[in-house]
Structure formats: C-alpha cells, structure tokens
C-alpha cells in the first residue's frame, strides 16, 4: 500500500517518489500483462449521440456507428447523459471475455442502451468501476436489479481502493455541500456482487488489467471536481481503519469534506498483441500522462496503441491544456479516443495538434482493435 501523504506531499521524500512512481526504497509493482488477440470497445453511455458522425477510416481500427433502429425498435433511441459506460470484449485464442466498465448516471439509460445495442448482460464475465463518482456508478443499482438473476453466480466488481465507497459532495454555495452520491456496499451484498479492491495492479479475467493506484509523477494535478468525506456515516461510507498507512488528518477523520484526490481511481487496460497497450482512463482525474506512465511501468510495455475515455480536461485552463497537449504529442500513441469529461477544449486542441491520432466518439459507437 502506498501511503497517501507520500503520494501527494511536496517534500524531499516525494521527490524520490516522483522519480520512480513509488516511495523511496519501494519497487514498482509489476504484473505480466496478458496479450489479447483482439479487443472491441462499445460506448454504451456517453454525453451525446450524433447520428451524422463520420464512420472514419482509421488504420488498424474498425469503427461502427449507430444511426438508428428499424422494425419494433424504430420509435426508440439511444439515450445520452452525463456519465460513461463501456462494453469491452476481448479474445485470446478461442476464449472471449466481456467486461462492463462503469455504469453511467442512471440505470434507465444504461438498460435502454444495452437492449438497443443488443448487448446481453448475462454474457458478462466481470464488472469494473473506475472511481466513486455518481456519473460512473449511478446506473449500477438499476442495472443489477434488472439483470442480476441471469448473470454468473460469482460476479465480481473490480475497484481501485476502499475510498471508492466514500461519500462525495459538491459545493452548494454559502459553504454548504450537496451529495454527489455514495457507492452502496450493502446494495452490492444484496445483489451477490463481490467487490475486489486493489491499490496494486491486478489482472482481470486473464485478459485485462488495472493500473492500480496512479502515482503523480508528471506536471499534472487533479483539476477541480468534488470533495470527499472520509469515514462511515449512516451505515455506509469508507472504512478508514483499512488504510492505517494513509495517515488521515483529524479533520478528515471528523468527516470534514476535503478536495478529492481520487487515490482509488484506476484505469483498465489491455495489452493488444503486436500493437501495444490500450488504456481506458474513464475520467482520468489523476492525469492522462500519469496514467500512461503507470501502465507502462507496471507492464514494461512502452508502446501505447490507444488512449480511450474521459481525460478530465474540460475544466483545464488554456495554459495547462497547452502543456498537457504538448507532452501528449511527444508520446508514442497511435490513436486517441476522447469521451465524457475530455472537453470541447481538448477536442479543438487535438484537432489542431494531433489530427492523425484523433477519433471522434459518440454513444453507440463501437471500436474494434486487432480484428
């Protein structure tokens, strides 16, 4: 476990930490990232559905767009909302594994889109939650209510750490806060879903892997978002006793909301045979450069085939965005798929600075790699 103060503090110890991504004297956790032969990622929920978006011709990637529906479904449409949910299917030899990464804001939208896209939850091998924000786990309860009975009995939900269960709040004015949701552990237990928490990298179902906790080694910082309330309230929340080495302050232990550093947020990745890493950031609060650095460090694979998901650059000041874009251009990345919180500012910058790598995304789009 990485002490949280070592992760964030600006001290001499943190300087040693920044060189390696882990505290001085500690080795970077390594995993043997399994190679997959092919991977498809379908956007089940995102912020918009553009029926006119181009299919695009991208070397090494087959892109499918959803225009509309016919027959019994012709009066129905894909719904879009603030949130993200991705259906990911990978093959390794004769074996196929399917994961659902994040669940959008509401179960109504998630369930509607899964049905229209012809995606059967009964075929899922595991679930993954990237972090404890309502726009990423909000649809989980409604999804499980509708589909759990038909899914595998030993269903697992992979999470990056205990503080995924913390209460999140957002400013409501005059020093007050409004709830931004809390992932309910008792709901998971009632649905017979087993949480798998790991701050270290972890292989999922023999195909994918998580980055584990993402060290802050670049110029990036966590841009404004929610505050977090550590500890347990009303029978829920996160158990700080499981994080003795994280050194919570008295104010945090007393339940004072503090700016959320997303220590538990992880990325979900694949090692695509002959192509390199496909890194899915979901929201990327820890920074997309930091996330790429961690994925490389834990696998030893340097080539990045695709960077996919939310990059949380929508609230970025222009000078900050320019610096991140300049560094991103220096990376060896074939394709960039910005979604969700990446922001129109990032899209404009990418069109200008990385047009050969940029792929536009919309609800319903499917991207097939290595096929």
Image: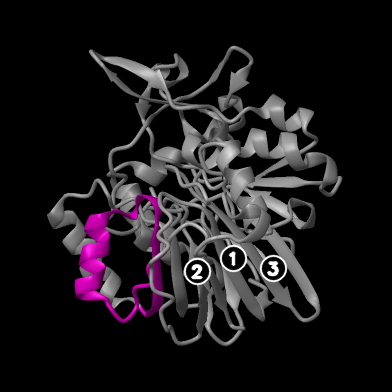
Q: CA distance from mark 2 to mark 3?
A: 26 Å
- Residue for badge 2: 65
- Residue for badge 3: 207
Identify the residue shown where x is 13% and y is 56%.
Answer: 319
Q: CA distance from mark 1 to mark 2?
A: 37 Å
In terms of secondary structure, where does tag 2 sit? loop
Q: What is the residue that sits farthest to the left in this orientation?
A: 319
Residue 37 in percent (x, y) is at: 67, 81
Q: 77 or 241: nearer the eye?
A: 77
Residue 366 in percent (x, y) is at: 54, 68
310 left or right, relative to 236: left
> Considering only vertical position in the picture, is 58 above or below 340?
below
> Considering only vertical position in the picture, is 108 above or below 56?
above
**Magenta highlight on residue 350:** yes
Disc with the residue nearer the chain's start (1 vs 2): 1
Residue 286 in percent (x, y) is at: 39, 50
Identify the residue shown where x is 65% and y is 59%.
Answer: 71
The region drawn magenta spans 332-361
């Amino acid at each position: 476990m990485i002490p949280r103060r070592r992760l964030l503090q600006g001290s001499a110890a943190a300087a040693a930490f920044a060189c390696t991504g882990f505290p001085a004297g500690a080795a970077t956790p390594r995993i043997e990232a399994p190679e997959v032969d092919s991977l498809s990622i379908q956007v089940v929920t995102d912020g918009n559905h553009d029926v006119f978006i181009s299919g695009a011709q991208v070397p090494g990637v087959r892109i499918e767009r959803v225009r509309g529906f016919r027959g019994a479904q012709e009066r129905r449409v894909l719904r879009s909302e603030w949130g993200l949910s991705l259906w990911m299917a990978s093959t390794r030899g004769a074996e196929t594994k399917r994961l659902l990464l994040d669940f959008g804001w509401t179960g109504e939208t998630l369930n509607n889109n899964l049905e229209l896209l012809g995606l059967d939850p009964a075929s899922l091998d595991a679930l993954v939650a990237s972090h404890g924000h309502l726009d990423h786990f909000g649809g989980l309860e409604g999804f499980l209510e509708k589909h759990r009975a038909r899914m595998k009995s030993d269903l697992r939900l992979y999470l990056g750490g205990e503080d995924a269960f913390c209460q999140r709040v957002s400013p409501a004015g005059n020093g007050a806060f409004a709830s931004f949701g809390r992932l309910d552990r008792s709901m998971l237990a009632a649905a017979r879903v087993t949480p798998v928490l790991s701050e270290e990298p972890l292989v999922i179902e023999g195909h994918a892997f998580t980055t584990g906790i993402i060290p802050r080694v670049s110029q990036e910082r966590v841009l404004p978002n929610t505050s977090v309330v550590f500890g347990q309230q009303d029978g829920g929340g996160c158990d700080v006793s499981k994080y003795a080495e994280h050194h919570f302050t008295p104010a945090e232990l007393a339940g004072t909301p503090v700016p959320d550093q997303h220590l538990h947020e992880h990325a979900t990745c694949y090692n695509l045979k002959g192509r390199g890493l496909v890194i899915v950031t979901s929201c990327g609060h820890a920074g997309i450069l930091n996330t790429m650095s961690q994925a490389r460090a834990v696998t030893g694979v340097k080539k990045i085939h695709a960077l996919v998901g939310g990059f949380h650059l929508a609230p970025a000041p222009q000078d900050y965005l320019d610096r991140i874009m300049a560094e991103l251009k220096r990376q060896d990345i074939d394709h960039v798929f910005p979604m969700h919180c990446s922001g129109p500012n990032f899209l404009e910058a990418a069109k200008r600075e990385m047009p050969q790598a940029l792929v536009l995304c919309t609800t319903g789009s499917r991207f097939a790699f290595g096929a």
